[in-house]
Amino acid sequence: AALRTLNARGEFLITVLTDAEGLLMASAPSPGWDAEKQAAVVALVQRAARQAQAASMDAADEVAIRDVTGRRLICRPFEVDGQILLLSVLMEAGRPYRRLTNDAIRDVRRAWAF
């Protein structure tokens, strides 16, 4: 429910929560986003996480990929109980996301505590 709310508030195309290995934990695609597109986004998230680790960026605050149309994939790694998770959002150009993803990360941390 939290990811669907995040999607709606940010008008994101898809929101995905994975572990550091790219294992899908939760997702919220917008209407018109099927499982194939969702899987492609998860694969991008996984590659971004691996590349950040390979570049010794284990303390990275976010990783961003932008296509030629301006669409952005933002991957936000964060730690919960010693485990690295990635919250990723795919959005059209010009959409704000930072405050919304901060709120979502805080909500995941709270939910994880229960």
Image (cartoon, rainbow, N blue to C red):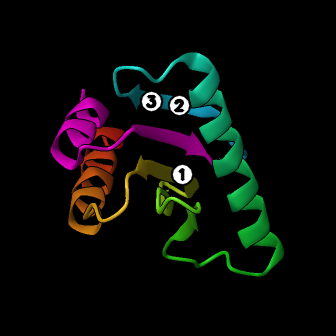
The answer to whether marks 3 and 1 mark residues whose Cβ atoms lie closer than 8 Å is: no
Q: Position of residue 111 (x, y in %)?
A: 28, 39
Is residue 22 depicted above or below 95 in this figure? above
Q: Earlier in the sequence, mark 2 or mark 1?
A: 2
Element at badge 2?
strand
Q: Earlier in the sequence, mark 3 or mark 1?
A: 3
Mark pair 2, 1: CA separation: 9 Å
Q: Quadrant of the N terminus?
A: top left
Query: Residue flagged by tag 2: what amino acid is it?
Result: Met
- Left/right placement of residue 81 relative to residue 45 reads left
Q: Are marks 2 and 1 in contact (CB under 8 Å)?
A: yes
Where is residue 77 drawn, in percent x and y? 52, 62
> Percent position (x, y) of residue 68?
58, 63
Which residue sits furthest front?
Answer: 69
84 magenta-colored: no
Residue 35 location in percent, x, y?
A: 57, 18
Circle 3 residue? 27
Range shown magenta = 1-20
Judging by the rendered image, the residue that carries numbered circle 2 is 25
Horizontal side, residue 7 vs residue 60: left or right: left
Q: Is residue 70 at all visible to an observer of this figure?
A: yes
Looking at the rendered structure, the secondary structure element under dot 3 is: strand
The type of residue carrying mark 1 is Leu
- At horizontal 57% and vertical 69% (from top left) the residue drawn is 63
Of badges 3 and 1, the one in the foreground is 3
Q: Which amino acid, mark 3? A: Ser
Q: Residues within 10 Å of mark 1 (few under 14, many from 20)?
A: many
Q: Compare residues 110 and 62 and report the one nearer the observer.
A: 62
Residue drawn at point x = 75 percent, y = 54 percent: 47
Residue plotted at (68% across, 48% down)? 44
> Which residue carries the number 1 mark?
85
Query: Which corner quadrant holds the C terminus?
Result: top left
